[in-house]
Amino acid sequence: MLSVIKKNFFSIIAKINAIVKGFNDFQRYMKSIVRSFRSLRYLKIRSLYTIVINQVKFTGIDALPLVSWIALLLGGTVIIQANTNFPKYGIESFIGNLLVIIIARELGPLVTALIVVARSGSAIAAEIATQMQNREIFSLELMGIDTRMYIILPRIVASFTAIFTLIIIFDVIAFFGGYFIALTTVYIPVETFIQTLLDAFTFNDLLVTITKSIIYGILIPLICCYYGLKPRSSYEIPIYVSKAVIRTLLVIFIINAVISVLFYF
């Protein structure tokens, strides 16, 4: 009995030490990125611009069909459930409030971030890990290029731009997807629908969208690049790609809950 307790105790201590070590390592990683901003003036803007454009295309434009379909289906699902469970209240009277509360405040930013992590976050981690194994990053360092700034900064800029744009597109498609589904059960003039949306949508909602876009746009590439730089052999690449996705998802859910509490509780 005593040996089991001691074993569990040392196991917990080891896990705590691993967590502390991980936080310290990530802190050093963040400090190195901050220091790298000094070298920004030495980098060619044209080369950074090309990387940003390619990342925006992959993260934003290429993800647009998937985001659009999911938004359309979610908007329709919200209205179907509302009409099924609250028919006596008259869906036309609260459709705007319902879509803003569920889609604009929560599902729009959250689902968009999840799609970006699944598509782009995993790709970023795998790409950087592969470059590490092929010694491409080492070659850049030999040429005197600050790899932190050259690799991470363009992905942060592209991620924020893509996520903010995708969230707006997601919300609009989900709103009108919900509206067209609602038309199958009750007629609502489009002017009335738009007015209910405008009445329900507040400056606070816009501020939350911008805040989540900035935080997600920074954290997703930061965490995925961090784990992409970790593998020391090709066998470790899948392990760290998996860690990048899982831990980024965990951080996103935590941040989403914290922001919702701060703005709406």
Image (spheres, rainbow, N blue to C red):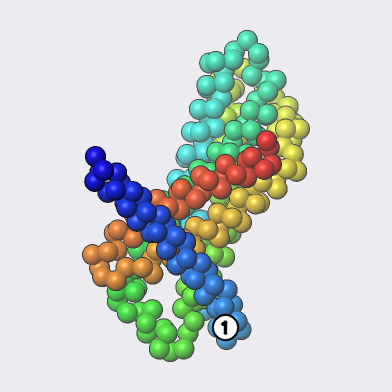
What residue is shown at x 30% (from left), y 58% (from top)?
Answer: 239
- Res. 122 image quadrant: bottom left
Q: Residues within 10 Å of mark 1 (few under 14, many from 20)?
A: few
Please, which residue is most extreme toward the bottom here?
143
Q: Position of residue 38 (x, y in %)?
A: 60, 82
Q: Secondary structure at mark 1?
A: helix
Compared with 184, 65 (above or below) is below
Tell whether 123 sits left or right of 162: left
In percent of the image, x 60 and y 53: which residue is there? 213
- Total labels drawn: 1
State whether residue 122 appears in this view. no
Quarter of the image for the C terminus: give it: top right
Q: Residue type at mark 1?
A: Ser
Instruction: Give me the residue at 67% from left, 29% from top.
Output: 96
- Foreground of the two, 46 or 153: 153
The one of 48 and 135 positioned closer to us in this rendering: 135
Q: Residue furthest top?
A: 88
In the picture, measured across the screen, residue 6 lies left or right of residue 108, that is: left
The quarter holding residue 153 reads bottom right
Can residue 21 be spotted in the picture? yes
Name the quarter where the N terminus is drawn.
top left
Residue 133 placed where, x, y %?
Answer: 29, 74
Task: Using residue 156 as the reference point, say whether residue 104 is left or right of it.
Answer: right
The percent coordinates of residue 198 (x first, y second) are 74, 35
Residue found at the far front of this picture: 2
**Is residue 252 depicted above or below 95 in this figure?**
below
Q: Is residue 130 above or below residue 70?
A: below
Residue 177, percent across and down? 56, 33
Q: Which residue is mark 1?
A: 39
Residue at 49 percent across and 57 percent down: it is 220
Comparing 42 with 185, the one in front is 42
